[in-house]
Amino acid sequence: MKTFAAIFFLLFSFQWLQAQDKCTALGQTPETAFPVCGNSVFKQVSVPTCINSALTVPGCSGDGAAYGDKNPFWYKFTCFKGGSLEFLIKPNDQGDDYDWQLYDITGHAPGDVYKDPKLIVAANWAGTYGNTGTTKSGVDYTQCASDPNAKEPSFAKDPILKEGHQYLLLVSHFTDSQSGYGLSFGGGTAVITDTTAPRLKSAAPGCDGSTIAVQLNKKVQCKSLAADGSDFTITPAAAKVIAASSTDCSRGFDMDSLSLTLDQPLPPGKYTLTIQNGTDHNTLLDNCENGIPQGDTLVFTVRAIAPTPMDSVTAPGCAPSAINVVFAGAMRCNSIDPDGSDFAISGPSPVSVTGASGLNCTGGLTTTVVLKLAGPIVHAGTYTVTLVKGGDNNSVISQCAQPTPVLSTVSFTAADTVNAGFAHTEQYVCNQVTIHLLNAGGNGITKWNWTTGSGLTASAPGFTYGDSTFNDQQVGLIVSNGVCSDTASAKFSLNNDYFVKARFEEPSFVCPNDAVTFVDHSMGTIASYDWDFGNGASSLLETPPTQQYPDVVRTRTFPVRLIVENIQGCRDTATRQLKVINNCFIAVPTAFTPNGDGMNDYLYPLNAYKARDLDFRIYNRYGQLVFQTRDWTNKWDGTFQGVPQPTGSYVWMLSYTNTDTGEKVFKKGATLLIR
């Protein structure tokens, strides 16, 4: 779109991207976005001039223009019920041009809006002056930069929000005026108003009782907190709240935690913190202007300052090379000697500590100290961690500046490592082997998981199974004592001296006067052969002489038997039925009667046992091909396309190659179909 506004935008966008200052005011970056509520109008009185970064605008960024969040304000909200979102941006000066873009940042950092265009839900960048936003009748595409006189659509179709998702709305002012606008939501079905009532959640006194850390159940407005602490009272009135603040308010507009400063430390005892209207005439207000009820209370206890003991050791895994010591409260990370000299470990086997550090130190505090060991603990038993005065001349110090007493102890239990190695033995009988597998166990092993290459499984220390294939065996084992596990596998061969299998190869059929060859394929270490060919002949040779079979009136089978014996005296027998054909002369009948009486019902080349590359075709008197096959046993039943053909003469053509001589044969003739 090369309109005046678009061309202007193209010519000057790179200049103002570089020339304008970066945005620093709260609300003008994605990270410091204003929280907004769906039931109120958010009024932006003025819009400071600045620029953050270039933006991708779907369907528009490719037109050559540079888009960015110029003179922006960002707004954040959560969808509490999915549906359509309708909102209105109403400039205080109807001659102003505002653009906007909506992002779904669920699971993303706010800054991802600059680099991930997949987060964009909807947008409108029209150059049209006046109101903009979303409506049911809006356009279902992104309107790009345009000439204001073109009056391009400035409203997009209501986008659909997803329940539980977090959204960012950018409102960008193309010109540098300071007139401001109003942002309101309404008309859609999505709910972006949090109906959870704000309440006090917890209170924890500081170390010396002169401060109280308060946690809320949801975010509230920073501006609703009275800085003089007048929103809170303490009973008994052993001290007075004189100040209130939140670190969240230095980087945003809302908070869910704050710190109260007292005029003097509270002595040990139980106290009640109560909220009331402060000097600003309200309690703490959420983003929808709902206040924490006056009189809402929290009970907390101020305890005498005491050392913080070691509480426990996180259950170590198998062969740990580090352990986690948990304290009963927050400890100062800078009081932990990095060389681990604050700790000693004793137990069934020697253990040396070579390093120590706080786990997830936040604000310089941690509740867990990670001890690095010189080597893994591989022997089971109870071990004791003892706190000693380290190389820094102190033990570990608590948040409240109290050192945990030296010689304090805490114990933990370690497990043995395990071994999945196993032995195997075999017992042989003819054509069968029994395989015995055994793991020695020990070190508390309670689980065994055996698998074989043939799919057999077992779950005991020993595993016995049979095999008749005499193939190589593949066995795997996983063992565990509930903490440590180990895996082993083995591949081993069997003694084939006990395996014998009689097998031989014979022709699929025998024609008259054929010389028949039998080929031995028996398996095992064969010591003797005993052939019986079913024709009155026999042989004790591995490769017997060729055999002849008598002419038969009709096709007949002859039983052929082979008995083999191996060096261990094991025997096996194989028997086959040899098919002897009475006639192997290939011919096509001169007539057939497809009447279903079981006699001469089909037309096909008879006895084509010794034909390969066969092609048999049948034509009617019009020269139309009615049947074709390359398989001589596939017979014509006298029909064409399912319709019985009339009585008459049908021409056939037959071609094949004789398998004995290699001669190529072509024949043709006619056959009478009789009905």
Image (cartoon, rainbow, N blue to C red):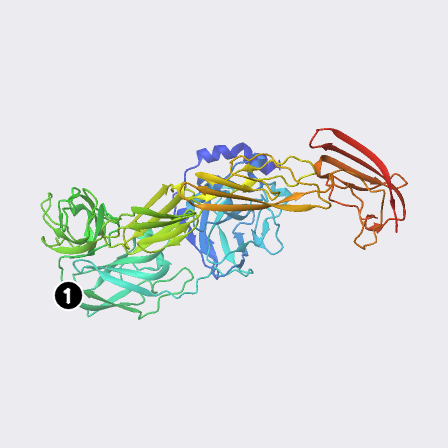
Q: Nearer the viewer, residue 144 or 383?
A: 383
- Quadrant containing the N terminus is top right
Where 196 sits versus 632, above or below? Answer: below
Number of labels in the image equals: 1
Quarter of the figure with residue 208:
bottom left
At numbered mark 1, what does the secondary structure look like: helix, strand or loop?
A: loop
Q: Position of residue 199 (x, y in %)?
A: 34, 66
Query: What percent of the width, then of the height, locates residue 493?
Result: 38, 41
In percent of width and height, residue 363 lies at 25, 49
**Residue shown at the point (26%, 52%) measured from the top left:** 441
For residue 57, say whether it is visible. no
Instruction: State left or right for residue 460 relative to residue 46.
Output: left
Residue 564 appears anywhere in the view: yes
Q: Residue at x 80, y 47 (%)?
A: 602
Q: Which residue is mark 1?
A: 268
Percent x, y of residue 631: 72, 41
State whether residue 415 is above or below residue 204. Answer: above
Name the residue type under label 1: Pro
Q: Is residue 672 left or right of residue 320?
A: right
Q: Nearer the viewer, residue 145 or 495?
A: 495
* Nearer the observer, 457 or 49: 457
Q: Is residue 625 left or right of residue 80?
A: right
Q: Residue furthest front?
A: 536
| Residue in front for this viewpoint, 473 or 221 | 473
Q: Residues within 10 Å of mark 1 (few under 14, many from 20)?
A: few
